[in-house]
Image: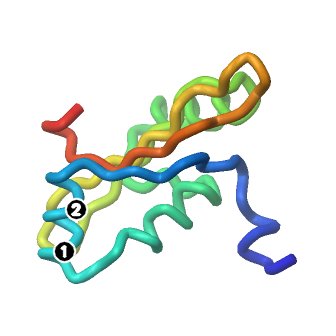
Amino acid sequence: MSTQQQQTQFPLGQIVATPGALEALQHNHTTGLEFLQRHARGDWGDLSNEDRQANDDALHSGARILSSYLLTDETKLWIITEAADESGNRTATTLLLPEEY
């Protein structure tokens, strides 16, 4: 198992992106993979201490997880992993712009 896999804090489930996020990623010449990797490792990006703590708590409670990153052109990209279902599975992670929430 790679070091990166060992550092993953939770499963992402199916990865999807909104049209706005796809356009922003293309405009910034990135696929978003680096942000997904950071998100899965528990690097929440540009969040308040309160939101960081909520994410840390969500790792144990199964609640929704939100990360926020700035792209090269200062566009804000959110990544949200859905709350775990009754079986503890997180089924989807979405890349989106805040205005698409």
Q: Which mark is residue 45?
A: none
Task: Please tell me which residue lies in front, 92 or 78.
Answer: 92
Percent coordinates x, y for residue 18 in the rendering:
25, 48
- Density class for disc 1 (Cα within 10 Å; few <14, some 14-19, many ≥20) is few
Q: Which mark is residue 26?
A: 1
Image quadrant of residue 47? top left
Question: On screen, 83 above or below 95?
Answer: above
State left or right for residue 72 relative to residue 60. left
Residue drawn at x 64%, y 36% as measured from the top left: 90
Q: Which residue is mark 2?
A: 22
Q: Determine whether the residue tagged by mark 2 lies in a helix, strand or loop.
A: helix
Task: Please tell me which residue lies in front, 49 or 72.
Answer: 72
**Labelled pair 2, 1 in contact (Cβ < 8 Å):** yes
Q: Amino acid at mark 1?
A: Gln
Residue drawn at x 46%, y 33% as measured from the top left: 51
Q: Residue furthest top?
A: 86
Question: On screen, 49 above or below 3?
Answer: above
Question: On screen, 27 above or below 56?
Answer: below
Task: Please tell me which residue lies in front, 26 or 39.
Answer: 26
Percent coordinates x, y for residue 77 in the rendering:
27, 54
Percent coordinates x, y for residue 50 in the rendering:
47, 30
Residue drawn at x 60%, y 49% as measured from the top left: 12
Task: Please tell me which residue lies in front, 33 or 65.
Answer: 33
Image quadrant of residue 76? bottom left
State left or right for residue 64 relative to residue 89. left
Q: Determine whether the residue tagged by mark 1 lies in a helix, strand or loop.
A: helix
For the N terminus, which image quadrant? bottom right
- Density class for disc 2 (Cα within 10 Å; few <14, some 14-19, many ≥20) is some
Percent coordinates x, y for residue 34 in the rendering:
46, 73
State left or right for residue 51 relative to residue 6. left
Q: CA distance from mark 2 to mark 1?
A: 6 Å
